[in-house]
Amino acid sequence: MNHQEALTEYLAAFVSGLVQAGVKDVVISPGSRSTPLALLIAENRDLNVYMNIDERSAGFFALGMAKASQRPVALLCTSGTAAANYFPAVVEANLSRVPLIILTADRPHELRDVGAPQAIDQIHLYGNHVRWFTDLALPEFGQEQYAFNTAVRAIKEATGHLQGPVHLNFPLREPLLPILEPYPFTEKIKELKISQGNLTISNETAREIAEQIQQIENGLIIVGDIDKPELAEAIHQFAQLTGYPIVADPLSQLRGSTTADSQVIDSYDAILKNEQAVNLLRPDLIIRFGSMPVSKPLTLFLKKWRQSPHIIVDGGSGWRDPQNLGTMMVQCDEAIFCHTIKAFFTEARQTQYFSIWKDLNHIAKETIASYLKSMNDLDEGKVIYELAKVIPENSTIFAGNSMPIRDVDTFFHQTRKNIHLMANRGANGIDGVVSTAIGAAVYRNPLYLVIGDLSFFHDLNGLLAAKLNDISINIILINNDGGGIFSFLPQSKLDRHYELLFGTPIGIDFSYAMKMYGGEYCKITNWGEFDQAIEATAEKSGIHVIEVQTNRQANLESHRNMWRLIGEEIDRYFEAMKNGH
Amino acid sequence: MNHQEALTEYLAAFVSGLVQAGVKDVVISPGSRSTPLALLIAENRDLNVYMNIDERSAGFFALGMAKASQRPVALLCTSGTAAANYFPAVVEANLSRVPLIILTADRPHELRDVGAPQAIDQIHLYGNHVRWFTDLALPEFGQEQYAFNTAVRAIKEATGHLQGPVHLNFPLREPLLPILEPYPFTEKIKELKISQGNLTISNETAREIAEQIQQIENGLIIVGDIDKPELAEAIHQFAQLTGYPIVADPLSQLRGSTTADSQVIDSYDAILKNEQAVNLLRPDLIIRFGSMPVSKPLTLFLKKWRQSPHIIVDGGSGWRDPQNLGTMMVQCDEAIFCHTIKAFFTEARQTQYFSIWKDLNHIAKETIASYLKSMNDLDEGKVIYELAKVIPENSTIFAGNSMPIRDVDTFFHQTRKNIHLMANRGANGIDGVVSTAIGAAVYRNPLYLVIGDLSFFHDLNGLLAAKLNDISINIILINNDGGGIFSFLPQSKLDRHYELLFGTPIGIDFSYAMKMYGGEYCKITNWGEFDQAIEATAEKSGIHVIEVQTNRQANLESHRNMWRLIGEEIDRYFEAMKNGH
């Protein structure tokens, strides 16, 4: 059997393994060493190919697709720095637990570490940032089952309890052309099924937790970033039976869920800026799901009441406790946890603790609403509030990091519109956000990305994928010409170096980027135009950028004013309570 | 002593160490965790700060500066994926042996691997791709000398025999503001000098090599990518005494050197496509400096004559021999090698072997010149030829990877204009080329970047650094709407998947990019316009893009026609030689 036949059969078996294990989408960047894999993947009838020139964008684009489709997505690039460009997306996928299957072509062994062109050390290239790494053998006749099984195993490693990226490195020797006729994917390979169950909780532990809940009225359920469709209903029932409020992070998917109910508290960030509230809302038990919420006041609140028992439920058996608050780690599938504990309860519990939370939540939301109503200037918070009002049913909002996700936390309130909320909160990078959102838009449409100017600039290249693959996306660009978040940090008071190191205005007119990538661009000047622009997106496909120009200093003051007003209203509420009203 | 004082003294000592060890330039990307280092670096009077928003571009920008200034350049970013974005530039710096000092801010130990925001595993983040890694201690009073010495040691590791990147990771605890008054850089620290000599060759080995050279007339000197200013003169003298031709890669700096002489052969790529030439020019001894040359015909020629003794001289004590051709590895500074061997010779040697090389070189160059003269279409090879003609004295050409560097090899002939030639040939990536060239332009001006459209797109973000830091650069954009190099590979004959996977046309009008970054753009339509556009750059600063639109298929045919003509002329020469003319 000659080289070309061995190459074809071996790699075709690998590609068949990907298909059998459930991969549907492959994002490819052009290159020479990866030629045989690229051609076989393109030839396979069960795989969709997305071309993405820039590997950094490609990595995040695949991440977005995997998050939105809830399936592993494969990536393929050539040898050399191409593979190094995947690194930021690999890091994010690791921490946000998203299954990416990284396939890198490599030079054969005799060309490693001897100054050959485009040959870099790709062994364990991503270090501990992947769940699994393997350097495959050179293609060889008789090793088809090995190649097939390696693909299946890779998907299993990426989609286990602690989901994440895996890296497969393929040394390939020239010539690199596979044989495409006849159709190279045969049925000769023995299939391999892998079945992995969910993590459960023991009866004793469940009983212990249930009894604890029954004894404690002032309990709090906290739900951070977690995207498991079956969870909303389970947590909803769990909260009703326990009588505990659900403090729901924007990425909990509980704010924009049709099964969301009155148990959800969404304005805790504003409430917990008030000192009286922090003191009077002391929780005697905390049950936490998903990753740590975005809100800093919530974190400070939890740190203040760190003596309270604190149960962390994690179906991925990770260790999400940066403040060392946990008193019990329950490594159990979150929905199974809720259903198991639920069985110990018979009817819904009403608690005063929840009533107070509910009142304060109402006060905060009313104050925000009336504050924003009187606000005529273009304000970053109001962007989210207005968007929530006019956004079509069944839309997805993708929030950029730094300021947008925080503004979504404060200004995106519970709705029955069924809105899905997404962000990259594994490593919280401002990089790759455009590409991730475009990847998500392949599966979630319409999608609205809310992003700041620095983050938009960082991944401007990501727009090419939308252009070349005809993916529709709406981008709300909040342009305050620089890094707005630093205005909230102590260095903003420095008399020198501030604009150079932190403000970093870039002074770019992004309308030209839209001309380059064939998108539509508008810059709105008032809220009427904003609402119209959002409404107009419902009927159009393609890339749409709606730019909102804001001012960093005004934005800082506006946020502070609003928080002050909410604080005053809360004080008034407690005053009235003390006076017996 | 409080936290802020300890933070300031410790990090100020570190920054003082950088300065003492010779760092002048620091490229900073904005971030929060890196605040104290950023502020202290900005405050230091001996350091220049360059802000670069996108860390991927920042990494390559620093690489370009380090290459052009021949000094270590430091980079600073915040924690998280920011650091992962440096990876492609770190990989290139490793293989091209460029000293980059990577400083990454990190969360303190208690926030690692517990789900804290923007906390990723930064320990050994770049694996074996750096010369040295250290995770510094948290800032502490009394550890200033340790911080200072770590900086000095880092520079030493980066600038030793095998130069390259180093990575220093800084865990930092909040609050992050240092004290800037009074001027925090004191003289209290004990200075630390490190002196490292050059690698030399023993007398016995030198004598042995000299005697071998004296016995062999048909010897060949090959100089690949190497940028040591003192080398041109040393190799020139060495070649005259030995009578050996110098096969000079474009990155040898011997083609555009005022000390270059008639010993240099620059058209070997065209010559060695001819079978008779390959056979009749058999070398009996090869002495090679620098990395492997770009030319594929040269590599095939060396592989064919692999039985000949082959000496590899490497002052960085690396192992640059992808074809296993070497019979002797001489780990010695290249100039010292030439001077040491030279001492065994008294007068210049004339050889027939060199005469033939010289004749063939003349034939190839004449044929190329007359072929291009008759060429009216916009042709990729002619771009280099015309550029060489009209480029101002003391300019630098930065060649993009993939096609431009190969065209420079073929079409940039020896000149006395003193032209410096640069490229990223460590890992040969098409990524980061724009940023590297802009970084180089800080020290080398005027600079002309020749780049293809895919590579230009890949690092479009790099242009922001030129805009924000007022760096002038001239970019000759060869736009064949896709990946031209694949036309030369076997897959170009495929009837399907070719344009999707390899041609990858992106259809972008780059004039909008120039509007965005405040540069000037022109698209030339004939050679007169091209010459005028290049000449016009001499008087203007800023970013200039001169776009040359070419056709992938026509370009392939044009290259092939020219090589055929050269082959015919060479055959005629050998025919005449056989007939005694």
Image (cartoon, coloured by chain):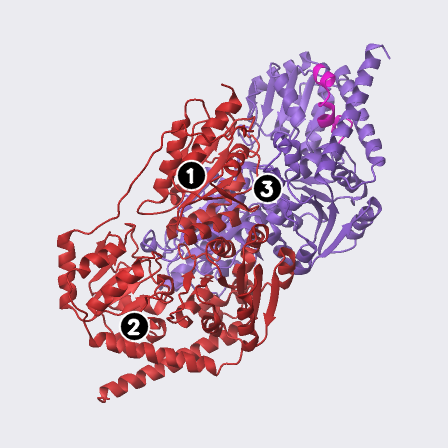
Chain colours: A red, B purple
Residue type at mark 3?
Leu
Q: Residues within 10 Å of mark 3 (few under 14, many from 20)?
A: some
Residue occupied by mark 1: A19
Of mark 1 and mark 2, the one earlier in the sequence is 1
Q: Which image quadrant for residue B176?
A: bottom left
Q: Chain of mark 2?
A: A
Element at badge 3? Answer: helix
Give whichever of B144, B349 is nearer the camera: B349
Contact between labelled residues 3 and 1, with CB atoms less than 8 Å apart: no
Contact between labelled residues 2 and 1, with CB atoms less than 8 Å apart: no
The image shows residue A227 at horizontal and vertical percentages of: 36, 57
Residue occupied by mark 3: B500
Q: Quadrant of the N terminus of chain B?
A: bottom left
A559 versus A16 height, above or below: below
Q: Chain of mark 1?
A: A
- Marks 1 and 3, how far apart at CA: 21 Å
Q: In the orientation shown, which residue stands out farthest toward the top?
A: B579
Q: Viewed as shown, does residue B420 lie left or right of B209?
A: right
Does the stretch in magenta take in B271?
yes
Element at badge 1? Answer: helix
Q: Which mark is residue A262?
A: 2
Q: Which residues are magenta?
A: B260-279
